[in-house]
Amino acid sequence: MIRVPVLVLAFLLALAPQMVLADEMIVSGLSQNRVSITADFDGSEILIYGAVKRDAPAPGDSPLEVIITVEGPASPVMVRRKDRVAGIWVNNAAVRIDSAPSFYAVATTGPLNHILSDTDNLRFGITIERVIRAVGIAAEADDAGEFILALLRVRTDEDRFRILEGRVELTEDTLFRTDVVLPANLTEGEYKVRLFLLRDQKVVAHQERVIGVRKVGLERFVFKLAHERPLVYGLLSLVLAALAGWGASAAFRLFRA
Amino acid sequence: MQLYLPIAEVSVNAFLILGLGGIVGFMSGMFGVGGGFLITPLLFFIGVPPAVAVATGANQVVASSVSGVLAQLRRKGVDFQMGGVLLAGGIAGSAIGVWLFNWMKALGQVDLFVQLSYVLFLGLIGAMMLQESLRTLLRSRQTGAPIRRSHVHSWVHGLPFKMKFRASGLYISVIPPLIVGALVGVLAAIMGVGGGFIMVPAMIYLLGMPTKVVIGTSLFQIIFVTAFTTVMHAVTSQTVDMMLALLLILGGVVGAQIGTRVGMRLKAEQLRILLSLLVLSVSIRIALDLLMKPDELYSVAGGVLP
């Protein structure tokens, strides 16, 4: 009777991916797991490093590849297209995309289409196209695919989406490292770092880490006040404005006198 | 010096913002306009999200207007009675404007609506002012030409509910200023500006107020309109960025003081020509945006959506 739960547990453990892919595992570290947005925040560079832990000698048949993704908090977005109507350019068609990350970087050891199979890309959601959730957008516009491409283009131009192919350094098939620059226009939230080991275009091991990005100090105080006590915040803004106006006027009068 | 803005969530150069505030404050002090029609497009340009730019712009206008009014007050350039009447109309108009704005929002064409309002009203008023002030300037050069009287009696003077506006030296019905205030209120709410660029010519040409009190009175009522707008934005959408506003204000209040003094040295006609050229160029800029094929046809609006 006691054996049943033990068996179930053993079965569950056997199902866990780490156990299935036990021959190679990731041991990783981040240069920082918190990013504080202070008043002088101007972007931040994160070093992501790690090693491959093996119980047996590395299988020599295919080379080891590494993919590292960093994903910022997602939100729904509206993509609009301008068309010429009666001689002027106006927002005409719009497509709502359920969820797109505010930041996404993919760093790899080589070209993505060489080292990653479509099946595993779909399964793990590695490239940006796979991370954006856009269900049923075909019904919203004739060429809904164009809108997704536009979203990728716009966000890439804003440095929010980055493909860093070949930017993961891999030494002796064991040690790897990459630098990811977080831009200055960072959104607050949990940034998900995912590390994948691949062999033969297949993911053989993966791991997930989190970087917390938070406003601190004055930034935090202003943001909280604005959202939790909006009326107080609005009135305070007015008082500051009026005081500054009066102060400048008084200062100038003294200056002239 | 880079500074991260807590509400706009972008990092900007603090000196750039101070400079922007200074320029807009200078215009504000010189012409008696709030500068909202300048600050908002300028903030878009440096990458501040539009909603934050509109709301924070309103907050900055409050400060520069207070500073400007205080400077005008010392030279007795504020007609409080007229300001009060205009404001009463303005608040009613602003309520109608907010309603119109939300209606266009429901139709999904609010951007176009705002842009077209800018082109139409800035263009119209700029052109009218330019034409009128050029004519005055030319006439003053021709000696011996008939001088236009400052008070022309028209239908405006035949309306009931007359009131004495001592500072303006006017004895007119309260109906025209109420209507002017209301119209400006509607436009202000739609375009997210104080409405000074409409108010100033309306006071000069429609109400026949002397130029001496026009700027101060316009600024006086702009304070209240933009204060109302700021609080509304802070409460409904949390888009007022205090840090951004403070930087703009610091630059702006200094600019406004200098602008007021420069404005006093210029002749009224010159002032009007400059203002009309400024208004026209903003209008043309926005019109070009609408007429020319944009580089990127698609735009992405992120964040929380209805």
Image (tube, coloured by chain):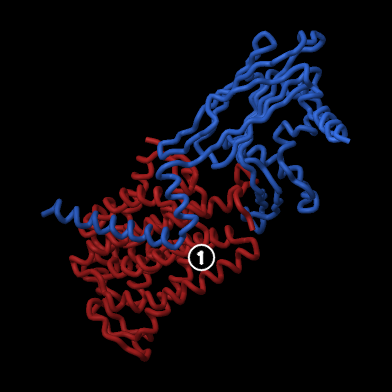
Chain colours: A blue, B red
* For residue A183, above or below residue A254: above
Quadrant holding the C terminus of chain B: bottom right
Circle 1 packing at 10 Å, graded few (<14), some (14-19), many (20+), is many
| Residue depicted at x 51% and y 49% | B49
Q: Quadrant of residue B108?
A: bottom right
- In this rendering, would B280 be left or right of A256? right
The residue nearer to you, when weighing B40 against B250, is B250
Q: Quadrant of residue A199?
A: top right
Residue B301 percent location from the top left of the image: 61, 49
* For residue B216, above or below residue A219: below
| Residue depicted at x 55% and y 36% | A212
* For residue B245, above or below residue A3: below
Q: How many marks?
A: 1
Find the residue positioned furthest to the bottom.
Answer: B160
Residue A255 percent location from the top left of the image: 15, 51
Residue matched to label 1? B190
| Residue depicted at x 62% and y 61% | B109
**Residue B141 in view in this figure:** no
Residue type (three-letter) at the residue carrying disc 1: Ile
Q: Quadrant of residue B71?
A: bottom left
Kind of element beneath mark 1: helix
Residue B145 percent location from the top left of the image: 25, 71
Find the residue positioned furthest to the left.
Answer: A257
The residue nearer to you, when weighing B189 against A115, is A115
**Residue A214 in view in this figure:** yes
- In this rendering, would A249 be left or right of A67? left
The residue nearer to you, when weighing B148 against B80, is B80
Residue B188 percent location from the top left of the image: 45, 66
Quadrant holding the N terminus of chain B: top left
Q: Chain of mark 1?
A: B
